[in-house]
Amino acid sequence: MSKKEKQAQFFPFDNQSDEEIVDVEVEIEDESSIELMEKPFDPTKINIETKTPSLDTLIKRIARDSIEMDTSSYFQRKDDLWDRTKQSRLIESILIRFPLPAFFFDASDDDKWLVVDGLQRLSSVRNFCVKQEGKAMMKLTNLEFLNHLEGSNFEDLPISLQRVIEEAEVVIYKIMPGTPTDVKFNIFKRINTGGLILESQEIRHALFQGKPAKFIAKLAENKNFLQATQHRIKTHRMLDRDFANRFLGFYLFGYENYFTDLETFMSKAMAEINFLGDDRLLEIENDFGKSMKLAQDIFKDKAFRKIYKNHKRTPPINKALFDAISTQFALLSDNERNTLKTQKVKFRNLLKESLKTDPEFFASVTSSTGDKKRVILRHSKIRELIHQTININDYVR
């Protein structure tokens, strides 16, 4: 491989204009070579029940509010995204006895199932079979086969057709209590097929409702975090909380204890919040805020960005640099942070030079960023640069 080819491999942005690399606020992460789980979950712990009830079972649960249809509270995605034509044709499919795709529920709480997959189909059934009054009442429209039912609502249908809907057999999969959260996460991630595929942080938000979800949201709303990132990380699809969750994982467990599965590592961090007292949570929040303030003081408007040359325009925020810098800054003492701040020019230059001349370090924040070796390399490198800047002599790589 020629020197030019190696340069292109390790520094891919050198072949792009500055305009091309700043179209997004957060650099798209290359996960092409993420390894399999180091410790796969035990398949014997997967507890999923398969049932084939009548559709009336789901209709009654919807009517009694035993299915949480407002998934915006835990998935940040909405019901009722289908127009009336698409909803009507689903009802028409039931009437002509076409089989429906399976429904998936998290049935950890039997009094309030969470919809994992099938939300829009359930919304259509609810609108036609449950909402019988006012503007919400749905009437069939633009049918393909049963044209004589145009304009009908559920009550308008002959009893025989109402019975066809109620007695239609459906397949449901229920994720039962006791199923480990890492198993649930993988189930959620693999089977959700809605028009808006769930992001990993949205799934974690759903799995860890209550104290964990609220704490991650609080970190994402930290004023120093918002200022250090120039308010450029979008709240849409919980991207901001994904950043906060990354910090939490490495802060709590240390990069030395990372295993080759970033998603499970981050889920473990959220689960850990349930076991932490208020004092510990306040300590984490304070350290995160101090870390973000230090990043802003040192880098101004260029924090967590992969700067290795004199760019005409500032590159986007890099997730891998964020998790390494934010964590290592948070683990410093107040005196060490103050010293580093006074030596900010030296630290910036050391980081820039390392990105420019160390291909392995550059790769660790560019591709396969969830790989264990690359996680350890980038965190240890940032730690080394900090210690080199403030002359801590006990650094051991």
Image (spheres, rainbow, N blue to C red):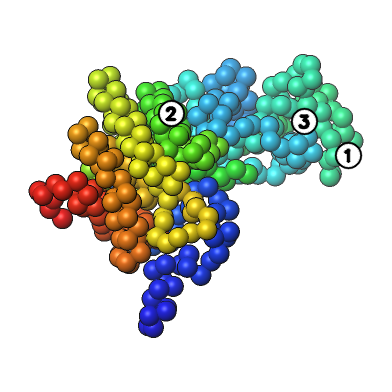
**Residue in view at x 22 percent, y 32 percent:** 334
Q: Are marks 1 and 2 in contact (CB under 8 Å)?
A: no
Q: Which residue is mark 2?
A: 223
Choose top left, top right, bottom left or bottom right for residue 340: top left
- The earlier-in-sequence mark between 1 and 2 is 1
Residue 233 lies, in percent from the top left, at: 50, 40
- Judge whether residue 186 can be spotted in this image: no
The picture places residue 296, in percent across and down from the top left corner, at: 39, 39
**Amino acid at dot 1:** Asn
- Name the one closer to the observer, 231 or 63: 231
Q: Amino acid at mark 3?
A: Leu
Mark 3 Cα-neighbour bin, 10 Å: few <14, some 14–19, many ≥20? some
Q: Compared to 356, does 113 lie above or below?
A: above
Pointer 3: what residue? 161
Q: Which residue is mark 1?
A: 147
- Report whether 82 appears left or right of 393: right
